[in-house]
Amino acid sequence: MRIVLSDFMSLDGVVQAPGGPQEDTDGGFAHGGWSMPYFDVEVMGGAIDEAMKDTRALLFGRRTWQTMAAAWPERAGSDPFADHMNAITKYVASTTLTEADMTWNNSTLLPADNVLGAIADLRASGEGDMHVMGSSVLARSLVENDMVDEYRLMISPVLLGGGKRIFPEDGVARHLRLVSHTMASTGTQVCVFRPADAG
């Protein structure tokens, strides 16, 4: 099973709170919802739909899972994408949530004392893609541990000046190759990268 990171990203690498003003104000972040003016339904929506075709499971950090769990169930039956989000297997990395919190359909809490080990086991035993949406802390940990098989980045022409990032600052060079690239009408670059040594 491949681990695929999917993020809306500013040109200076910020992935924080793309969806709404109050989604994530950690660190005084004041640009929540920054990605919406750059969203091209045809190109970017199509890229998201394409990525979901091979997705067999979703992998979330706590905050992103809670945001999604509060949004998608209420849209069941009225939106095919919502139905897919509700039906697909979901894994949650958290040290504070409990099994009792796993109220969103098909959600499984990973063991808090061995999250990366559990993810490695899933990666080794499954097929298709395990998609990580947002979840910047988890995504950064996966990058640090060389567990990412594909990056799907929608890089918008805006500088946010600070915020959460998924790329570690550990002095390690990680070489990637560009697999595909599409330009949205808004100037957003829809890019797919894989590790340079991957097939």
Image (cartoon, rainbow, N blue to C red):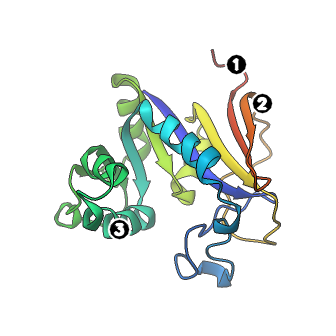
Rendered residue at 59%/79% (across/down): 26
Q: What is the distance, in whole Å, between disc 2 and disc 3 at their CAs?
A: 36 Å
Q: What is the distance, in whole Å, between disc 1 and disc 3 at their CAs?
A: 38 Å
Q: Is residue 144 visible?
A: no
Depth check: 1 or 40 in front?
A: 40
Rendered residue at 67%/46% (across/down): 153
2 relative to 104 in the view: left or right: right
Amino acid tagged 3: Ala
Amino acid tagged 2: His
Amino acid tagged 1: Asp
184 relative to 132 in the view: left or right: right
Residue 54, above or below 86? above
x, y percentage for residue 14?
Answer: 71, 62
**Dots 1 and 2: beta carbons under 8 Å?**
yes
Depth check: 6 or 76 in front?
A: 76
Rendered residue at 57%/30% (across/down): 149
The residue where tag 3 is placed is 71
Rendered residue at 57%/36% (across/down): 148
Q: Point out the residue furthest to the left here.
A: 100
The residue where tag 2 is placed is 175
Of mark 1 and mark 3, the one earlier in the sequence is 3
